[in-house]
Amino acid sequence: MYRELLSELIQEYDEAKLQNPCSEKEIAKAEKIVGYPFPNELKALLRETDGDRWFLLSVKEIMEIVELNRSILSESFEPDEYLEKVDRHIFFATNGCGDYYCYRVLENGEVDTSGIYLWDHEEFETRYVAKDIKDAIVKYYHSEI
């Protein structure tokens, strides 16, 4: 489903290239590094393409962002504030300007799958942008988010 949708949408973007599917082992490793279980729709996307080298991040990039944030940003905040503003998100796509599209994680550790959010790297705040990952992909490639 996602691969077909993306194949259609990325035609106008020379830089975007669908990648090979991600293995279950790689998804499990990324979940462990991130610290939260990935929503089913994100796992389904990764099983079809491990990013698109433009908008969607690969599992390697997802892990790198988390590790980078933890090494740099965790020192800028009190632990609880860092959890709330940075670490309690599952980043899976980028706008190319330092902001990330993500799922929010609730205080109880449950992933909020009610929507997709844009995380602002300067304000450390999120805003709702799409109802699900498919909606985010379509909106992004139609320049609506």
Image (cartoon, rainbow, N blue to C red):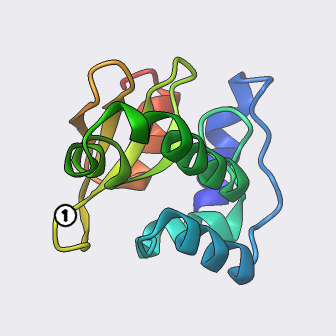
Q: Amino acid at mark 1?
A: Leu
Q: Position of residue 104 (x, y in %)?
A: 28, 54
Q: Position of residue 18 (x, y in %)?
A: 77, 48
> Does residue 57 appear left or right of residue 91 in this picture?
right
Helix, strand or loop at label 1? It is loop
Q: Give the residue at x 66% y 47%.
A: 64
Residue 78 occupies quadrant: top left
Q: What is the x, y in percent for residue 42?
A: 49, 65
Image quarter for residue 132? bottom left
One can see residue 101 in this view:
yes
Question: Up-down: is 25 above or below 121?
Answer: below
Residue position for label 1 = 106
Q: Quadrant of the C terminus?
A: top left
The residue under the point 21% across, 51% down is: 80
Residue 44 seen in the current view = no
Q: Position of residue 106 (x, y in %)?
A: 19, 63
Looking at the image, which residue is at 55% across and 42% down?
71
Out of 98 and 79, give the one closest to the viewer: 79
Front one among 142 and 33: 33
